[in-house]
Amino acid sequence: MPSTPASASSPALLEVRDLRVHFFTRDGVVRAVDGVDFQVGPAETLGIVGESGSGKTVTSLAVLGLAPPPAKTVSGQILFEGSDLVRKTGPQMSQVRGRRIAMIFQNPTTSLNPIYSVGAQLGEVLMWHERLDRRAAEARAAELLRLVGITDPLARLRQFPHELSGGMKQRVGIARALLCNPALVLADEPTTALDVTIQAQILDLLAELQERLRMSMVLVTHDMGVVARMADRITVMYAGRVCESGDARTIFNAPLHPYTRALLDSLPRVDQSYAAARPKLATIAGRPPNLLDPPRGCRFHDRCPDAIADCARVLPLETSVAPGHTVSCIRRGSQGLAA
Amino acid sequence: MDTHPPSAALAIVPPQRRPPGIWRQGWFRFRRNRGGMLGLGLVCLVTLTALLCWLAPYDPNDQSAMLHGAARAAPSWAHLLGTDRNGYDVLSRVMYGAPTALAVGIGAMVIAAVIGVIIGGVAGYFGGLVDEALMRFAEFFLVVPVFIVILAVVRLFGIMVVGTRLESIPHLNLMAIIALLGLFGWPPIARMARAEFLRLRQAEFVEAAVCIGTTKRDILLRHILPNALPSLIVLIALGIGGAILAEAMVSFLGFGDPKAVSWGQLLYFNYEALKVAPWASLSPGVAIFLTVLGFNLLADGLTDAFNPRLRQ
Amino acid sequence: MTRYIVRRLLFSACLILGVSVILFALINAIGNPIEILLAERPGVTDEIIASVSKYYGLEGNMVDRYFTWLWAILRGDFGTSIIYNQPVSELLVIFGLETLKIQVPAILIAVALAVGAAVVAATRQYSRVDFGVIAGAMLGHSLPGFFVGIVLILVFAYWLGILPSYGAYSTRALLLDSPVADGLWHMVLPVTMLAIFNTATLTLLMRASLVDVLRQDFITAARASGLPERRVVFGHALRNAFIPVLTYLGILFGLMLGTAPVTETVFTWPGLGALYILAIQQLDYPVIMGITMVVTVMLVAATLLTDIAYVAIDPRIRLA
């Protein structure tokens, strides 16, 4: 775990307030992100954790205004470098994307255009944002490939994506994100599609790069192990809302929200033997709610071991229980909104 | 939190209804597709006209209008779609053209489907050299200018039978056209059949069937074929439309069956009089259009219904 | 890559040979066309038939004749037309150019329009514009070509009187006294008819392909890099979307060429199609064989070209 704790007094680089992103489908409105708040400080790594369908990927895409139709950001603010990104137009966002905020995608095979060479794809970004000519762009691209640990970068620039391994493609993806020295990098499950052995390498690389370039990172993942290694602060999401948010140490050692607890409990432990099927691997019973028609109260209440009757009626709001630590659970002291 | 009901309640459990199979599911999805439903409607309209063509106001070979100078007359109450160059009532001839069109479409596709499924199935089943050879053979038909060759063969066939016994068979020319369309129309079906066969052969349920000892014949007929049907049906629907269009074109050029009442023949007879009697050419033209459109929309709707993944 | 091309060329050559054999056999199965044409005429003796047949190379047994014919073809000699009494190769060039005059512009216009329509529709998916484009394209795709042609003639030539209803050139006064203007004026309707079907079909294909591509991760990634939307659509999406459409271009061209007889009958256009109909009516078999061979070769060439283009554009296939 990185050793630089977040300071509550330094201004946030990115601040998301009450973000709501809804999908307007033929069958109804899916409230994928329904009131999410978080902040990222300078040179800080925020881990956003949640299971599939929690809305974490949509959140990260929405920061860049890239949530795919039929999604729309219906309300909320995304404050970055003095302006609200939600209010920006397409051309204005083009200036932010890739230059100030960049994104690393989950699947390195599908996130590179198969018919263009690596050099062409990297060069294109440089020529557009930094107005470099082809030779300068190629040189800078090679420099970045070296930075992400790719040997013989000039040869790689000529190659096409399908000629590279998964790990190498993801390094290219990382290089692409860093081309213009962004202040913030959004990494959406950057290691999920990779072999386990390569995962460790990539995470090490990301940690090293962040240290060197002093950039902020939002790491979206479902893997608690990844967050444990990389994140300064953690935000736990469930069914489109935030359950708990705090610095990594607190979340791991003293989690408050029942969902966070259950997540941590479900991690297999190295110091226990599961061979005799006792104790069993802990799971969370039930399934995430249907976001077409989310429950009125707390969205976790039907799977929660600590739920009481009120939980089904009162929507918990994120409330601060300690400096830098917020929780949305009425049983842990949150304010609530009666439905 | 205990979410399980007390065991006593489990005693009375209503029997589960079988979930709808792929055909019913497909039908439900199809119903939502407006284009497909329109296509179905058009096809039904044509079929109905074909079945009820004897309700036409005039006999299709009735040229009495010519006798009292009413040939090439504009549409009127006596002749709802007017009369044509030879004094025939256009509406009646168009109605009688419907069964011809369907006979052509369905006849050609039956031939094409049988040949195609057999060849495609054999290719998929045996693989290797047999597969290669058969697929090269199919490719041959893709490269050859099919329409042009059909024209030549129809014409030459017509000459060959002059003076032979075959000449007396009614509508021999039309049947030759149908046969040729079928003989040239099987490659796309063979290709699809082969692809489906290869895909399904590796499906898990086929593996399971083999495991429990199902005979090869049963696997083919009861497992693979029914699952390949949706894609094949789509191709067949498209093919029917295409065959009707092809016959119309062959007849329009003058190589059709002069005794048969087909929409293409109508166009052939009346194209010269386009300026003075446009209704005589437009009516069969519209009929061909609606029929082909109907089958195309139907095929499109069926594709959506059976393969929702392919949709946007 | 060269091995691939060579293999395809060899296969194509076999294909063409195969077609020639079959057609040759068919035509000659019906007997000597000279005999058929001249048989009932008064004053025609067997010697006359024999000498005329010899002049047109119709004597001898089928196998000999086939190889003679094949050898001649390979040297560019397509024989002499029975109807026109001119070298078939000359006829092929004259009529062929007329056919290309309407088909090439039709395809080019169709590609341009289809790309435009597809981009407009795919970038506004589910909107009214999208549905409008789809509906229009489905309509254009299902309208029988010759019906479109007939309606066009009816509306523009007969009712409005602004375009000619037949032929490639005016028989009396040329439009604006210029053969170029006159030719173009006559080309408008036939090209429009061909372009409608081609545009409609290509639009449907391109739109579907583009919609598919726009959903891909690398498009989102390109946007995430800050590239302007125009560049993402035209530089990244369109190029990828064009690949599956490319194969279809070959098929489309083949379809146009194959139905040229119909097109040219509707507009009384003096092209290969019209010549072909005349030839099979009159049993002018050098012309029949000549046109069939030329068309087959053109189709094979089109297929080969699209295959090569496919391999050239998509780098993933090159190594296969």
Image: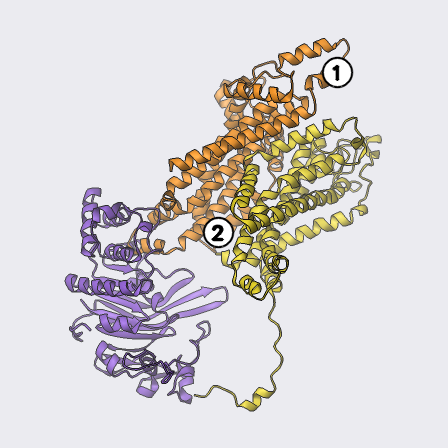
Residue underneath mark 2? C130
The x, y position of residue B50, in whole percent, is: 75, 47
In terms of depth relative to the viewer, which is nearer, A293 or B166? B166
Residue underneath mark 1? C39
Q: Nearer the viewer, mark 2 or mark 1?
A: 1
Chain of the residue that carries numbered disc 2 in the rendered image: C
Q: Is residue C168 left or right of residue A262?
A: right
Q: Residue at x 39, y 74 (%)?
A: A239
- The chain displayed orange equals C
Q: Is residue B241 left or right of residue A287?
A: right
The x, y position of residue B229, in whole percent, is: 61, 55
- The chain displayed purple equals A
Mark 2 or mark 1: name the one nearer the start of the chain.
Answer: 1
In terms of depth relative to the viewer, which is nearer, B81 or A259? A259
Chain of the residue that carries numbered disc 1 in the rendered image: C
The x, y position of residue C302, in whole percent, is: 48, 34
**Amino acid identity at mark 2:** Asp
The answer to whether A143 is drawn above or below residue A279 in the figure is above
Q: Is residue A123 left or right of residue B190?
A: left
- Residue C169 can be seen in this image: no
- The chain displayed yellow equals B
The x, y position of residue A78, in whole percent, is: 28, 66
